[in-house]
Image (cartoon, coloured by chain):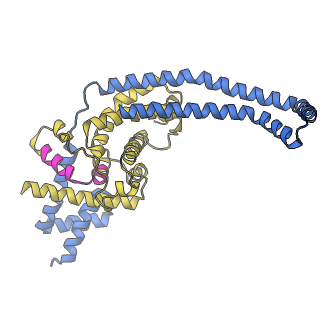
Amino acid sequence: MTMTSDMHARAVTLISKERVEGISAAEQEWLDRHLRECPRCAESANATQQALRSLRALRSAVPRELAARTQFRVRLRAQELQAREPRWRLIWAMCGASWVAGAATAPYVWRGLEWFGHRAGLPDLVWKMGFGVWWALPAIVAAAVLLMEGGERGAARDAGGAA
Amino acid sequence: MADDKKSLVQGLRQRDPELLDRLIEEYQYRLFRYLLYITGNTERAEDFFQETWIRVLERGHQYDGKFKFEAWLFTIARNLVIDWQRQKKAVSLDSMMDPEEGKGFEPVDEKAESPLNLFLQEETQGRVQASLEQLPAAYREVLLLRFQEEMQLDEIARIQATPISTVKSRLYRGLDALKGLLAGGAA
């Protein structure tokens, strides 16, 4: 059979394709036949095989105690996270209770602020804004706590990264 | 198998320390090798190894068991390396990871002794290692994932957050480059 440069190019492509993504049975058959007849492409297939064999044979050792050190750090971090959990639960419970209490007492607070606003001669807008702040207070406290937590974590990570 | 995965998902969600100890033992070699390949530096690989497991602890609830655990683990490790690299240099993710754009992602510490040299003993291994070090990290990474980890193309694509076509292209180029380097070294 006469070999053309297209056939060699196809063979070289199939040699890599076989390893990277697989080839069809028909392609495999064609390639096997070609490799039997073409020493140059057979050499290329051999080089690919050799390169992959060498790659697979590479060994690298894990530094001593790395796993143990990591396990220790992970356990410490797990304890930290566990210690933080009850605090979070408390914060959410307090927020919830605060919102319930806020909803239940809203009419009284409204009337109280209205009375105080009129007594003090404040414009309506001022005491109404006061009512808004009173309502938003639990959310503001929760947001402040969240921001502080985030800041602490970021600082701890930065310190870890710097180390 | 499904039960194993279920208990893995549950254990990670509950931050089970026994499970994490077991996973660290089990995956230490593969994760360290992967980090060594993509950072090119032993000390850095050690740091990222520890950080990866801390992240696994913190974000264990995000693992849903749909994909292999090692693919998720390697994704975490890879993202940590990229974050660190991003902080170090204000360059885009694409230009870091894509060897076709500029020099590619190469966090190898030039002052430090070649890390793989410390680990590889035999002459042939030394030659392969030297060839690998000349490859862009993105090629090294796909070669490791495909031919050492024997991952599927879609798993590699998920880890690298790139289309499968990009993974294939990197594999072809990486394989060609490795062959060329090995042949050059042998000559």
- Does A57 lie within the magenta span? no
Q: Pick the residue in front: B102 or B126.
A: B102
Compared across the picture, whether A85 is left or right of A29 comes to right
Q: What secondary structure is the stretch in magenta mostly built from?
A: helix
Determine whether B173 is above or below A59 in the image.
below
The picture places residue A18, in percent across and down from the top left corner, at 28, 59
Residue situated furthest front in the rendering: A121
Q: Chain B rendered in what hue?
A: yellow
The picture places residue B8, in percent across and down from the top left corner, at 48, 32
Q: Pick the residue in front: B185 or A25.
A: B185
- Does B132 lie within the magenta span? yes
Compared across the picture, whether B140 is left or right of A154 comes to left
The quadrant in which residue A96 appears is top right
* Image point (13%, 44%), residue name: B126
Determine whether B110 is above or below A144 in the image.
below
Q: Pick the residue in front: B93 or B138.
A: B93
Span highlighted in magenta in the image: B125-142
The picture places residue A40, in percent across and down from the top left corner, at 12, 67
Inspect this view and state whether residue B85 appears.
yes
Q: Chain A rendered in what hue?
A: blue
